[in-house]
Image (cartoon, rainbow, N blue to C red):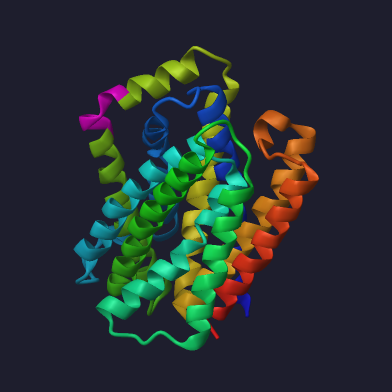
Amino acid sequence: MIWIIFPIVAAFGYTISNFINNYIIDTALKRKSPEALQVGYILVPILVITFLLAFFGFDVFSFRNPNSLILFAAGFIGVFGALPYFNALRLEETFSVTIFAQSSPLIALMLGTTILGEQITGNQSLAFILIFAAIFIIIATTKRPRHSNKINIKSALFVFVACLIWTSANVIFMLGVDANTPELLGNSIAWRALGSLVGLASMMLFKRQWVRTLKNAIKGRNVKYAVFLFISNCTDAFSEIFARIGIVLAPAISIMSVTSNISQLFFTFVLGIFLSILWPKFGREKLTKRVLLSHLVAVVLAISGVILLNT
């Protein structure tokens, strides 16, 4: 059962990163061009590669795994999932976005059904209903100015597209990963990280306005934004390594996915309340009785749904 530590730790790191992203988008970028934040995460694959090089040496980039290019493609494709995700964070609070992200197991199930020919069970059909009910509760109970429902639906669609990209990238990664030895696993993670690095570098090359936007937003304000972005890069890199190890060590990918989703949902709910009390601009959650109750109901429904997907 030691494998369970890896997705839980990864989920905690990703949750911290999400709150930092939300804060930077709100205060530094002023909710304009949130996709520009993605180029600020080029340090993540660099940190992952640096760690693997220090641990395994330059052999980590050998071609012992014939699927190296598949792993590279998984990393390259995965970085583009953050673009719609950051747009969702611009429109919604962190908790709501996390609830919307519970659609990722559903996407995995749909991909398995259409591509791999897997059958949908009765429990999985019920899980569809529960998770979509959780998403509907968040959309219906979030009071906003005019067009709020349109904003919430747009945010949910952004998250859905992000989850579709990330889930596809994870499927590609699992098609190419070789975990027979720690060295081969390190090799697989390194090639994926290299693909992510090239993807982010391509964004910086072809979307130079994003680089300028992020640079001006951070440079024109307090140095704390640069510190927060660095912390977020470090937590993401740490979480990325733990998540990849967890996928391999878990008895099944679906169980790993469920553990990660439930952990991140729990951490987001708890940290959202904690940060909103101590640092409202950072937490940005609305702590009315109505909101807390709807969030709690959504958590229960979403967790029940993801558990049902794997029973």
Side (left or right) of 292 relative to 106: right
User: In the depicted view, which residue is nearer to us: 194 or 74?
Assistant: 74
Corner quadrant of residue 167:
bottom left
Q: Nearer the viewer, residue 18 or 127?
A: 127
For the stretch drawn in magenta, the main secondary structure is helix
How many numbered badges does the structure rendering display? 0
- Is residue 233 toward the left or the right of residue 56 in the image? right
Expressed as whole percent of the image width and height from the top left, the position of residue 38 reads 39, 37
Looking at the image, residue 74 sits to the left or right of residue 32; the answer is left
Q: Residue at x 32, y 63 (%)?
A: 168
The residue depicted at 54 percent of the width and 40 percent of the height is 92
Q: Which residues are magenta?
A: 204-209
Q: Residue 180: tell me if it is visible.
A: yes
The answer to whether any part of residue 187 appears in the image is no
Question: 133 above or below 31?
Answer: below
Residue 203 part of the magenta-drawn span: no
Q: Is residue 291 left or right of residue 303?
A: right
- 26 and 185: which one is in front? 26
Image quadrant holding the C terminus, namely bottom right
Q: Where is residue 247 drawn, in percent x and y?
A: 46, 71
For residue 205: magenta? yes
Q: Residue at x 53, y 79 (%)?
A: 126
The location of residue 254, given as percent across then percent down, is 47, 76
The N terminus appears in which quarter of the rendering? bottom right
Residue under the point 37% across and 38% down: 42
From the top left corner, tell me how far across and down residue 292 is, in percent: 75, 50
Q: Look at the picture and state if 161 lies above or below 206.
A: below
Residue farthest to the top, as pictured: 220
Q: Say if 244 sits above or below 2 in the image.
A: above
Q: Quadrant of residue 110?
A: bottom left
